[in-house]
Amino acid sequence: MEVLPLGKFIMGKLDQKVAIVTGARSGIGRETAILLSREGASVVFTGRNKDAADETSSLIAKEGGKSLFIKHDVANEDNWIEVIKTTKDYFNSLDILINNAGQFFLKPIMETSLKDFNQICSVNIDGAWLGMKYCLPEMNDGGAIVNVSSLMGQMGLPDATGYCASKGAVTSMTKAAALEVANRNIKINALHPGVIWTPMVGAGSDGDNDLKSFFELETPLREVGLPKNMADAILFLCTTEYLTGSDLNVDGGRFADGAMGSNAS
Protein backbone atom coordinates (compact mmCIF):
# COMPACT_ATOMS: atom_id res chain seq x y z
CA MET A 1 0.00 0.00 0.00
CA GLU A 2 1.34 3.41 -0.95
CA VAL A 3 1.58 5.86 1.92
CA LEU A 4 1.06 9.42 0.75
CA PRO A 5 2.21 12.53 2.63
CA LEU A 6 -0.35 13.70 5.17
CA GLY A 7 -0.77 17.01 3.34
CA LYS A 8 -2.24 15.18 0.35
CA PHE A 9 -5.43 14.56 2.32
CA ILE A 10 -5.76 17.87 4.15
CA MET A 11 -7.61 20.77 2.57
CA GLY A 12 -6.03 24.06 3.55
CA LYS A 13 -8.13 26.92 4.85
CA LEU A 14 -6.98 29.05 1.91
CA ASP A 15 -6.93 26.59 -0.97
CA GLN A 16 -7.21 28.34 -4.36
CA LYS A 17 -6.76 31.77 -2.76
CA VAL A 18 -4.18 34.36 -3.83
CA ALA A 19 -2.62 36.61 -1.20
CA ILE A 20 -0.34 39.65 -1.22
CA VAL A 21 1.83 40.15 1.87
CA THR A 22 3.93 43.31 2.17
CA GLY A 23 7.09 43.57 4.23
CA ALA A 24 7.56 39.81 4.04
CA ARG A 25 11.34 39.48 3.90
CA SER A 26 11.53 38.80 7.66
CA GLY A 27 9.62 38.82 10.94
CA ILE A 28 5.83 38.93 10.94
CA GLY A 29 5.61 39.22 7.16
CA ARG A 30 7.76 36.17 6.51
CA GLU A 31 5.90 34.01 9.04
CA THR A 32 2.60 35.14 7.56
CA ALA A 33 3.62 34.40 3.97
CA ILE A 34 4.76 30.91 4.98
CA LEU A 35 1.60 30.17 6.97
CA LEU A 36 -0.78 31.39 4.25
CA SER A 37 1.09 29.24 1.75
CA ARG A 38 0.93 26.26 4.10
CA GLU A 39 -2.85 26.73 4.20
CA GLY A 40 -3.06 26.54 0.41
CA ALA A 41 -2.74 30.14 -0.78
CA SER A 42 -0.52 31.26 -3.63
CA VAL A 43 1.49 34.10 -2.10
CA VAL A 44 2.90 37.25 -3.63
CA PHE A 45 5.23 38.76 -1.06
CA THR A 46 6.93 42.10 -1.34
CA GLY A 47 9.80 44.02 0.20
CA ARG A 48 12.77 46.19 -0.56
CA ASN A 49 15.51 43.57 -0.22
CA LYS A 50 15.64 40.72 -2.72
CA ASP A 51 18.47 38.90 -0.94
CA ALA A 52 16.38 38.46 2.20
CA ALA A 53 13.40 37.48 0.06
CA ASP A 54 15.26 34.48 -1.35
CA GLU A 55 15.14 32.81 2.05
CA THR A 56 11.38 33.33 2.29
CA SER A 57 10.94 31.87 -1.20
CA SER A 58 13.01 28.83 -0.27
CA LEU A 59 11.06 28.20 2.90
CA ILE A 60 7.75 28.34 1.00
CA ALA A 61 9.03 26.14 -1.83
CA LYS A 62 10.37 23.60 0.68
CA GLU A 63 6.78 22.96 1.79
CA GLY A 64 5.50 22.75 -1.77
CA GLY A 65 3.97 26.22 -1.86
CA LYS A 66 3.73 28.72 -4.69
CA SER A 67 5.12 32.20 -4.26
CA LEU A 68 6.35 35.21 -6.15
CA PHE A 69 8.56 38.01 -4.81
CA ILE A 70 8.19 41.58 -6.08
CA LYS A 71 10.53 44.38 -5.04
CA HIS A 72 8.26 47.05 -3.68
CA ASP A 73 8.23 50.44 -1.99
CA VAL A 74 4.79 50.55 -0.36
CA ALA A 75 4.76 54.35 -0.33
CA ASN A 76 5.14 54.47 -4.12
CA GLU A 77 1.87 54.56 -6.05
CA ASP A 78 3.35 53.27 -9.30
CA ASN A 79 4.87 50.33 -7.42
CA TRP A 80 1.45 49.35 -6.14
CA ILE A 81 -0.06 49.48 -9.62
CA GLU A 82 2.72 47.16 -10.84
CA VAL A 83 2.31 44.77 -7.89
CA ILE A 84 -1.41 44.35 -8.59
CA LYS A 85 -0.87 43.93 -12.33
CA THR A 86 1.88 41.34 -11.82
CA THR A 87 -0.21 39.43 -9.29
CA LYS A 88 -3.18 39.22 -11.65
CA ASP A 89 -0.97 38.30 -14.61
CA TYR A 90 0.83 35.58 -12.65
CA PHE A 91 -1.98 34.05 -10.59
CA ASN A 92 -5.09 35.45 -12.35
CA SER A 93 -6.82 36.26 -9.06
CA LEU A 94 -6.61 38.23 -5.81
CA ASP A 95 -8.34 37.37 -2.52
CA ILE A 96 -6.22 38.60 0.36
CA LEU A 97 -4.07 41.62 1.19
CA ILE A 98 -1.86 41.80 4.29
CA ASN A 99 -0.63 45.37 4.76
CA ASN A 100 2.29 44.50 7.02
CA ALA A 101 5.16 46.73 5.89
CA GLY A 102 5.90 49.49 8.37
CA GLN A 103 8.44 51.81 9.90
CA PHE A 104 9.25 52.57 13.53
CA PHE A 105 11.50 54.96 15.40
CA LEU A 106 11.67 56.58 18.82
CA LYS A 107 12.51 60.28 19.06
CA PRO A 108 11.14 63.09 21.27
CA ILE A 109 8.68 65.32 19.45
CA MET A 110 10.96 68.35 19.85
CA GLU A 111 13.76 66.45 18.11
CA THR A 112 11.57 64.96 15.38
CA SER A 113 11.81 66.82 12.09
CA LEU A 114 8.90 67.26 9.73
CA LYS A 115 10.85 65.06 7.31
CA ASP A 116 11.00 62.31 9.95
CA PHE A 117 7.28 62.62 10.60
CA ASN A 118 6.32 62.64 6.93
CA GLN A 119 8.55 59.63 6.22
CA ILE A 120 6.95 57.38 8.83
CA CYS A 121 3.49 58.51 7.78
CA SER A 122 4.33 57.86 4.15
CA VAL A 123 5.24 54.24 4.84
CA ASN A 124 2.69 53.41 7.51
CA ILE A 125 -0.32 55.41 6.31
CA ASP A 126 0.19 55.87 2.56
CA GLY A 127 1.40 52.29 2.19
CA ALA A 128 -1.72 50.79 3.74
CA TRP A 129 -4.06 53.23 1.99
CA LEU A 130 -2.52 52.65 -1.43
CA GLY A 131 -2.70 48.91 -0.89
CA MET A 132 -6.41 49.06 -0.20
CA LYS A 133 -7.07 51.57 -2.97
CA TYR A 134 -5.49 49.45 -5.70
CA CYS A 135 -6.30 45.97 -4.39
CA LEU A 136 -10.01 46.46 -3.75
CA PRO A 137 -11.07 46.97 -7.40
CA GLU A 138 -9.26 43.74 -8.35
CA MET A 139 -10.14 41.69 -5.27
CA ASN A 140 -12.70 38.91 -5.45
CA ASP A 141 -15.88 39.41 -3.43
CA GLY A 142 -15.60 37.67 -0.09
CA GLY A 143 -11.93 38.56 0.22
CA ALA A 144 -10.03 39.86 3.23
CA ILE A 145 -7.65 42.68 4.10
CA VAL A 146 -5.61 42.77 7.30
CA ASN A 147 -3.94 46.06 8.18
CA VAL A 148 -1.16 45.54 10.70
CA SER A 149 -1.48 48.47 13.07
CA SER A 150 -0.13 48.50 16.64
CA LEU A 151 -1.14 48.97 20.24
CA MET A 152 0.33 52.42 19.66
CA GLY A 153 -2.57 53.04 17.31
CA GLN A 154 -4.80 52.89 20.39
CA MET A 155 -2.70 54.51 23.10
CA GLY A 156 0.30 56.76 23.56
CA LEU A 157 4.01 56.06 23.90
CA PRO A 158 6.59 58.70 24.83
CA ASP A 159 8.97 59.63 21.99
CA ALA A 160 6.71 57.98 19.40
CA THR A 161 4.39 60.72 18.15
CA GLY A 162 5.04 59.81 14.52
CA TYR A 163 4.49 56.10 15.05
CA CYS A 164 1.40 56.61 17.21
CA ALA A 165 -0.10 59.08 14.73
CA SER A 166 0.53 56.81 11.76
CA LYS A 167 -0.84 53.67 13.40
CA GLY A 168 -3.85 55.58 14.74
CA ALA A 169 -4.61 56.58 11.16
CA VAL A 170 -4.33 52.96 10.02
CA THR A 171 -6.77 51.92 12.75
CA SER A 172 -9.34 54.55 11.78
CA MET A 173 -9.18 54.09 8.03
CA THR A 174 -9.54 50.34 8.47
CA LYS A 175 -13.00 50.93 9.92
CA ALA A 176 -13.99 53.39 7.20
CA ALA A 177 -12.81 51.14 4.37
CA ALA A 178 -14.56 48.13 5.91
CA LEU A 179 -17.88 49.94 5.72
CA GLU A 180 -17.32 50.87 2.07
CA VAL A 181 -16.94 47.26 0.90
CA ALA A 182 -19.13 45.35 3.35
CA ASN A 183 -21.70 44.93 0.57
CA ARG A 184 -19.11 42.85 -1.30
CA ASN A 185 -18.51 40.67 1.77
CA ILE A 186 -14.88 41.82 1.90
CA LYS A 187 -13.69 41.86 5.49
CA ILE A 188 -11.16 44.52 6.53
CA ASN A 189 -9.73 44.36 10.05
CA ALA A 190 -6.80 45.78 11.98
CA LEU A 191 -4.29 43.69 13.90
CA HIS A 192 -2.66 45.34 16.90
CA PRO A 193 0.54 43.57 17.94
CA GLY A 194 2.12 44.20 21.31
CA VAL A 195 5.87 43.71 21.72
CA ILE A 196 6.87 41.20 19.06
CA TRP A 197 10.39 39.81 19.24
CA THR A 198 11.78 40.83 15.86
CA PRO A 199 14.88 42.80 14.78
CA MET A 200 12.73 45.96 14.84
CA VAL A 201 12.55 45.81 18.64
CA GLY A 202 15.98 44.39 19.34
CA ALA A 203 16.08 40.68 18.56
CA GLY A 204 19.61 39.80 17.52
CA SER A 205 21.14 42.95 19.00
CA ASP A 206 23.75 43.18 21.76
CA GLY A 207 22.15 42.72 25.14
CA ASP A 208 19.00 41.30 23.62
CA ASN A 209 18.47 38.86 26.50
CA ASP A 210 18.21 41.73 28.99
CA LEU A 211 15.80 43.58 26.72
CA LYS A 212 13.69 40.49 26.19
CA SER A 213 13.53 39.89 29.95
CA PHE A 214 12.37 43.48 30.46
CA PHE A 215 9.55 43.10 27.94
CA GLU A 216 8.52 39.78 29.49
CA LEU A 217 8.20 41.40 32.92
CA GLU A 218 6.15 44.23 31.40
CA THR A 219 3.68 41.80 29.78
CA PRO A 220 0.90 40.21 31.88
CA LEU A 221 1.42 36.78 30.27
CA ARG A 222 5.16 37.16 30.99
CA GLU A 223 6.08 36.34 27.40
CA VAL A 224 6.97 38.51 24.44
CA GLY A 225 5.08 37.81 21.25
CA LEU A 226 6.65 35.96 18.36
CA PRO A 227 6.06 36.46 14.63
CA LYS A 228 4.26 33.10 14.63
CA ASN A 229 1.68 34.46 17.08
CA MET A 230 0.91 37.30 14.69
CA ALA A 231 0.75 34.99 11.68
CA ASP A 232 -1.81 32.81 13.47
CA ALA A 233 -3.94 35.88 14.21
CA ILE A 234 -3.68 37.09 10.62
CA LEU A 235 -4.82 33.69 9.36
CA PHE A 236 -7.85 33.95 11.64
CA LEU A 237 -8.70 37.38 10.22
CA CYS A 238 -8.34 36.02 6.69
CA THR A 239 -10.87 33.26 7.33
CA THR A 240 -13.39 34.80 9.74
CA GLU A 241 -16.90 35.12 8.30
CA TYR A 242 -18.53 37.72 10.58
CA LEU A 243 -15.86 40.18 11.64
CA THR A 244 -15.08 43.42 9.85
CA GLY A 245 -13.99 46.92 10.82
CA SER A 246 -12.65 45.47 14.06
CA ASP A 247 -9.47 45.67 16.12
CA LEU A 248 -7.73 42.48 17.25
CA ASN A 249 -5.15 42.98 20.00
CA VAL A 250 -2.53 40.23 20.17
CA ASP A 251 -0.35 41.52 22.95
CA GLY A 252 -0.12 39.18 25.91
CA GLY A 253 -2.53 41.37 27.87
CA ARG A 254 -0.65 44.67 27.60
CA PHE A 255 -3.62 46.70 26.39
CA ALA A 256 -5.92 45.25 29.04
CA ASP A 257 -3.32 46.32 31.62
CA GLY A 258 -3.90 49.90 30.52
CA ALA A 259 -0.55 51.28 31.60
CA MET A 260 1.63 49.01 29.46
CA GLY A 261 2.82 46.72 32.19
CA SER A 262 2.04 48.61 35.37
CA ASN A 263 0.70 45.42 36.98
CA ALA A 264 3.97 43.56 36.54
CA SER A 265 5.08 42.18 39.89
Image (cartoon, rainbow, N blue to C red):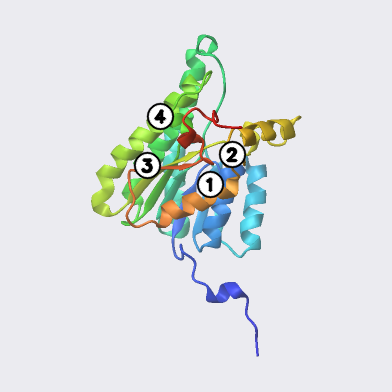
Q: Where's residue 133, x and y in %?
A: 35, 40
Question: Is tag 1's residue or tag 2's residue first in the polypeptide sequence?
Answer: 2
The residue wearing badge 2 is: 196
User: On the rendered structure, is 181 left or right of 230?
Assistant: left
Q: CA distance from mark 2 to mark 4?
A: 18 Å
Q: Measuring from the top left, give residue 177's x and y in whole percent.
A: 30, 40
Looking at the picture, which amino acid does disc 4 mark? Gly
Considering the image in quadrants, where does the N terminus appear? bottom right
Element marked by disc 3: helix
Separation (CA) of disc 1 from disc 2: 8 Å
Amino acid tagged 2: Ile
Distance Cα–Cα, label 3 vs label 1: 20 Å
Foreground mark, 3 or 1? 1
Categorize mark 2 by other alpha carbons within 10 Å: few (<14), some (14-19), many (20+): many
Please give the residue where the numbered disc 3 appears in the rendered image.
132
Element carrying mark 4: helix
